[in-house]
Image: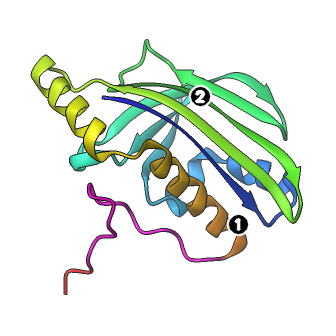
C-alpha cells in the first residue's frame, strides 16, 4: 500500500516552542490520535502508526537531515524490523500569527503476502485520503500546543467513530 501526502497547519505559537515540542517524539502518543507509540530505538525512533483496517504500521525513523528550528528529514532504518518503509520531511517557518508547520510523507506498507498487498493497495486507492491522515496528525499537534481538544481518530470511511453508547 503506497501512501504519499503533504499537509500544513499554522500553529499559534512561536517557532522555537513549536520545534521543541515537535521533536519530542516520545510525547507524540500523548497528543496524536494516530500514533500508538514512539520509542527510542538505537539512533532512531520506533513509531507505531494506527493504520487502516486496524493494521498498525511499525517503523524506526532516523533523521537524514537536521536543521534545528527549520527542517528535519527522515527515513526508515531498513535494517531494523518494520512493516512500512517511510521517508519524508517536516519544515517550520515563521508565519503571521505563529508558525507554519508542513509535513510530507511517502510510505510503502509491507503486508507480508502478495495477495494481502494487492488488497491493501486497492483499499488505499479507493478509501484512503493520505493528506487527510497527515492533516489529522498536524491538527492534533496544533490542538496540543494551542490547548484545544485533539481530533478523534479516523475510521476507514473518514467518519469519526461512534461513542458506542
Residue that label 1 marks: 145
Task: Give the image location of residue 48, x and y in percent.
Answer: 40, 42
Q: Are marks 1 and 2 in contact (CB under 8 Å)?
A: no
Residue that label 2 marks: 88
In the shown orientation, is residue 47 left or right of residue 113?
A: right
Residue at x 21%, y 48% (from the top left corner): 53
- The colour scheme applied to this rendered structure is rainbow
The quadrant of the picture occupied by the C terminus is: bottom left
Distance, label 1 to label 2, CA atoms, is: 23 Å
The number of numbered discs placed on residues in the rendered structure image is 2
Residue 158: within the magenta?
Answer: yes
Residue 138: within the magenta?
Answer: no
* Numbered disc 2: secondary structure: strand
* Numbered disc 1: secondary structure: helix
Residue 94 seen by the camera: yes
Task: Give the image location of residue 125, x and y in percent.
Answer: 29, 36
Task: Give the image location of residue 9, x and y in percent.
Answer: 68, 56
Q: Quadrant of residue 1?
A: top left
Identify the magenta region. Answer: 148-162
Amino acid at each position: 500500500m503506497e501512501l504519499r501526502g503533504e499537509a500544513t497547519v499554522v500553529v499559534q505559537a512561536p517557532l522555537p516552542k513549536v520545534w521543541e515540542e515537535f521533536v519530542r517524539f516520545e510525547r507524540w502518543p500523548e497528543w496524536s490520535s494516530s500514533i500508538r507509540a514512539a520509542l527510542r530505538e538505537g539512533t532512531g525512533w520506533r513509531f507505531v502508526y494506527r493504520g487502516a483496517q486496524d493494521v498498525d504500521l511499525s517503523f524506526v525513523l532516523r533523521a537524514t537531515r537536521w536543521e534545528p528550528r527549520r527542517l528535519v528529514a527522515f527515513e526508515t532504518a531498513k535494517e531494523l524490523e518494520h512493516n512500512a518503509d517511510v521517508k519524508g520531511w517536516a519544515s517550520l517557518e515563521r508565519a503571521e500569527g505563529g508558525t507554519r508547520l508542513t509535513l510530507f510523507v511517502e510510505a510503502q506498507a509491507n503486508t507480508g503476502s502478495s495477495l494481502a498487498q494487492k488488497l491493501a493497495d486497492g483499499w488505499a486507492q479507493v478509501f484512503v485520503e493520505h493528506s487527510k491522515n497527515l492533516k489529522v496528525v498536524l491538527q492534533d499537534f496544533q490542538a496540543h500546543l494551542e490547548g484545544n481538544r485533539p481530533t478523534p481518530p479516523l475510521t476507514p470511511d473518514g467518519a469519526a467513530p461512534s461513542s458506542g453508547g
